[in-house]
Image (cartoon, rainbow, N blue to C red):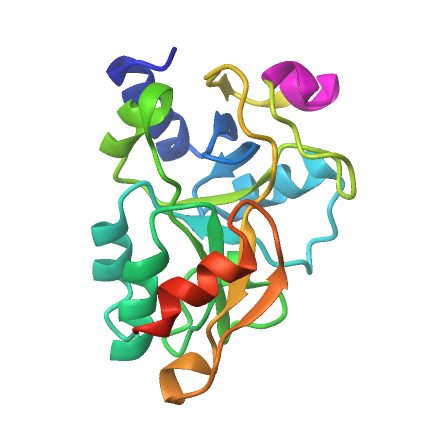
Amino acid sequence: MITAADAETFERCLAVHGVALFPADTVYGLACDPGAEEAVRRLYALKRRRPDKPAAVLFFDRDLALETLPELRPRVRRAAEALLPGGVTLLLDNPAGRFPLACGPDPGTLGLRVPALTDALAPLRAVRWPVLQSSANVAGGSDPRRVEDVPAPIRAEVEMILDAGELPGTPSTVVDLRRFGAGGGHAIVREGAVPAAVVAERLREV
């Protein structure tokens, strides 16, 4: 069970550039300050992930996420409001070049996550710190639904572990909205926790 004190400790961990193991609404992930180069390097090394692969930036509050990205086109903003919070990752145009350490070789694209924090995850809503996040596995490995499913070397090296019990276990659906703001459609890059048909229905009236 996660408590308000756990959420505060999580924020302090990020503030000192630690790497934390935490639960999202889909699978367990690794989190660090998206502006801390050494922390990002450690997170990628723990996963054995190539440093040129992008990661998502996760906010624990949708309004804070949208305030941080004032340059979003109106139609994209409405799409984000329709889809978030929830089990999706949105690929967005990033004209301001925000969070460059998360963007890999394409600084013009930002991956955005805002999980749905209900029940055991609710205390995390108080976290005001955005995180660079990636699933808590070795690159290419299975997505962990329990802390025990995370490889032991990763668990041994992180500064903090937040355990919320068993999660659904299906990673987020990746939705490409980069053409959406200019009147184009969306594309499903990876179907996961939210079915493609549900994404299409929510975007139909945007």
x, y (%) of residue 110?
47, 65
Asked which quadrant contains residue 112, the reply is bottom left
Q: Is residue 18 left or right of residue 152?
A: left
Left or right: 28, with 14 as reference point = right
Looking at the image, which is closer to me, 190 or 48? 190
- In this rendering, the answer to whether 71 lies above or below 6 is below
User: Where are the magenta residues, as a range?
Assistant: 147-156
User: x, y percentage for residue 56?
Assistant: 51, 53
Question: Where is 29 relative to 3, above or below?
Answer: below
User: Where residue 102 appears, x then y in whole percent?
Assistant: 52, 56
Q: Main secondary structure of the magenta part?
A: helix
Residue 24 in the figure: left or right of residue 46: left
* Residue drawn at the location 62% of the way across and 55% of the way down: 191
Q: If the image is split into quadrants, where does the C terminus sit?
A: bottom left
Q: Nearer the viewer, residue 80 or 56?
A: 80
Inspect this view and state whether residue 72 appears: yes
Farthest top residue in view: 1
Residue 80: where, in percent of width, then height? 33, 62
* Residue 149 lies in the magenta-colored region: yes
- Residue plotted at (37% across, 82% down): 181
Tell me: residue 66, above or below residue 117: below
Q: Residue at x 27, y 23 (%)?
A: 123
Q: Is residue 49 left or right of residue 35?
A: right
Q: Of residues 103 and 202, which is closer to you in this image? A: 202
Q: Quadrant of the N terminus?
A: top left
Quarter occupied by residue 94? bottom left
The mark tally for this picture is 0
